[in-house]
Image: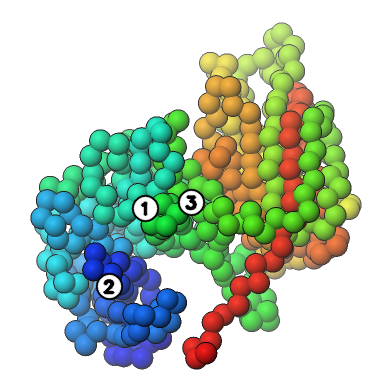
Amino acid sequence: MVPDHWYDINGVWSGSATQLPDGRIVMLYTGSTEDAVQVQLLAEPADPSDPLLRRWAKSESNPVLVPPPGIGLTDFRDPTTAWLNPTDRAWRITIGSKNQEHAGLALVYRTEDFLHYDLLPALLHVVQGTGMWECVDFYPVSADLAADVGLDTSTAPGPGVKHVLKASLDDDRHDYYGIGTYDAGTDRWTPDDAAIDVGIGLRYDYGKFYASKSFYDPVGRRRVLWGWIGESDSERADVLKGWASLQSIPRTVLLDTKTGSNLLQWPVVEVENLRMRGKLFDGLDMPPGSVVPLDVGRATQLDVEAVFQVQAGAPAAGSAAAGAEAPYNCSASAGSAGRGLLGPFGLLVLADDGLSEQTAVYFYLVRGADGKLSTHFCQDAFRSSKANDLVKAVYGSSVPVLDGEDLSVRILVDHSIVESFAQGGRTCITSRVYPTKAIYDSARVFLFNNATNLNVTAKSIKIWELNSAYIRPYPYSD
């Protein structure tokens, strides 16, 4: 898809494909016109028999949608995959925008043929103060405790079904989601918890992860999510290397039926086909202040699964340690170098022998005034590279840990990318890091415990070296 018509000459932007019951596939995408107006465009496979759908034909009817009254000419983009509304068996799509009061919103259109559309009077949802919503996504998830599968986008609302509404906020470049209920009669979505509504609550990923889109895989009966990982280095460095930004490892998405309040994201099972040599470490003690090397050989492409058990030391009576601790914020913290009573502890990846470069993936526990522990999951790139033209940050958030659960994390390491998934994917973090010393055969992995009053045991550490995927582009002609 290239910008070659007046209606998309300034950009072929995000969109979505929908497979119709008769097998046809239609694609709606946003184009930026010669006057920089955002419009919605229709395309279909030029050769439907091609299993790779390499060529697409743009409709003679384009543009099929233009900004409606009250919507800015540059605030109308990124149509979703369509879903069938069970009340009238017509299709619905939603498109992100904002209003004049800077509230983010999702418009809803009805169509029967993908050429003609009716703007419905009700908004799917609106949240004050969140600004422009890009790359809106809307899909059902199973709330059935026994289900471990994704749902088709047109699955009707009802018992055992929740709907996820996701928006990419142009204001801060993060992907936020909410879990709630879709009313097919009014085409409105209502969050289960307004305190964590779209744009003010949960995020897919607390690092470099934006403009994501999901699709339903009917063969694997799963919903798969792709995210855009931007760069953290300088524009000059991007120009020199000749490329910038890439897609995340695809993730499956499920509702966490144990908490009922968040999603679970996990690398697709195909990633496990890349696993080669593996090593297992059991029962490693990590006393306060310790750093434990793990001999795994080459450590630039890794799949790590780690499980930790913790035991807090007894604070002296009347000491500061006996009371509640100050709140913790990953992004405002000193990272893995900042010592607390009950954290940080975890793993150092893409580290050199002398630890002059390291990316820390860690947990940090805080005891509240009620004596209960809260858990934070963070990723620290402060010391990830000796290069000085980088944005080095600590990312993270809290992560739910239920009674009886150990602390667990999975980490995918790929040279300049670290993707981490805590507690089965309840909280996820992606970092772009650019080591100058911890590269190729010089990259190492360590366990660490920088807490002052916490004994940690690495109950189980499994580390596999990952093969390259050897993805090759298909030519336009055989």
Q: CA distance from mark 2 to mark 1?
A: 26 Å
Q: Tell me the colour scheme of the image.
A: rainbow
Q: CA distance from mark 3 to mark 1?
A: 15 Å
| SS for dot 3 | strand
Residue at x-position 53% and y-position 16%: 370
What amino acid type is highlighted by mark number 1?
A: Lys
The residue that mark 2 highlights is 24
Residue 341 appears in view: no
Which of the two discs, 2 and 3, sits closer to the camera? 2
| Position of residue 247 in the picture relative to residue 433 (left or right) | left
Residue 213: image quadrant is: bottom left
The residue that mark 1 highlights is 166
The x, y position of residue 91, in whole percent, is 18, 62
Question: Sequence order check: which comes first, mark 2 or mark 1?
Answer: 2
Residue at x-position 68% and y-position 79%: 241
The x, y position of residue 97, in whole percent, is 28, 63
**Neighbour class for label 1 at 10 Å: few (<14), some, many (≥20)?**
many
Residue 252 badge: 3
Q: Is residue 193 above or below residue 227?
A: above
| SS for dot 1 | strand
Question: Sequence order check: which comes first, mark 3 or mark 1?
Answer: 1
Residue at x-position 64% and y-position 41%: 409
The x, y position of residue 442, in whole percent, is 86, 60
Residue 78 badge: none
